[in-house]
Amino acid sequence: MKNYLKFGILILAILGTLGWLAAGGISDTKTYYKTIAELTQMGDSAKEKRLRVGGDIAAGSIERKGAEVTFVMAQEKMQLKVVYNGIEPLPDTFKPGAQALADGKLGADGVFHATKIQAKCASKYEAAPQVKGNPAVRSS
């Protein structure tokens, strides 16, 4: 009986340690998707967390200086300046008017410092218009 008890305690200790490591790893790597309005409402607590912020890339706001890319994300009359210094190249769909997700941290200066950018152009995924009279033929 003592052997079973020792074995059970050992198994519980191992499982507990694995659970604790998994929970700690998940909380360190998770990011929260926020809108620009939600980010503004967070105040100073936004500066303590790694976040993912979404919005539309404002027209004429993309500036490239070497490896650094600066742009403005806009959403519902709110704007957020973003500086990207990541090692991955920007996606092909990264252009004015496209929807973007910036992953990083908000700086003390109010600028969002992104380490990863994802972009999506909504018009690229729309269905092609069809020619009147023949739905199988599409105009180009």
Image: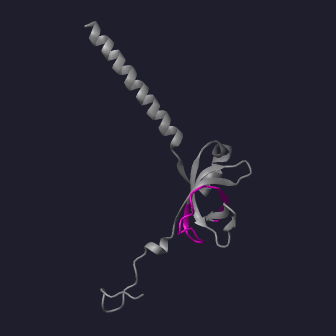
Q: Residue at x 60, y 43 (%)?
A: 49
Q: Is residue 62 left or right of residue 123?
A: right
Residue projecting furthest to the top: 2
User: Which quadrant, please, contains the N terminus?
Assistant: top left
- Residue 125 vs 50, above or below: the answer is below
What type of secondary structure mainly makes up the magenta span?
loop
Q: Residue at x 60, y 50 (%)?
A: 104
Q: Position of residue 108 (x, y in %)?
A: 73, 47
User: Which quadrant, please, contains the C terminus?
Assistant: bottom left
Q: Nearer the viewer, residue 133 or 72?
A: 72
Would residue 81 be counted in the magenta stretch?
yes
Q: Position of residue 81 (x, y in %)?
A: 68, 60
Q: Residue at x 66, y 60 (%)?
A: 67
Residue projecting furthest to the left: 1
Image quadrant assignment for residue 98: bottom right
Q: Which residues are magenta?
A: 77-100
Q: Position of residue 134 (x, y in %)?
A: 30, 90
Image quadrant assignment for residue 65: bottom right
Would residue 98 be counted in the magenta stretch?
yes
Q: Nearer the viewer, residue 12 or 47?
A: 12
Residue projecting furthest to the bottom: 133
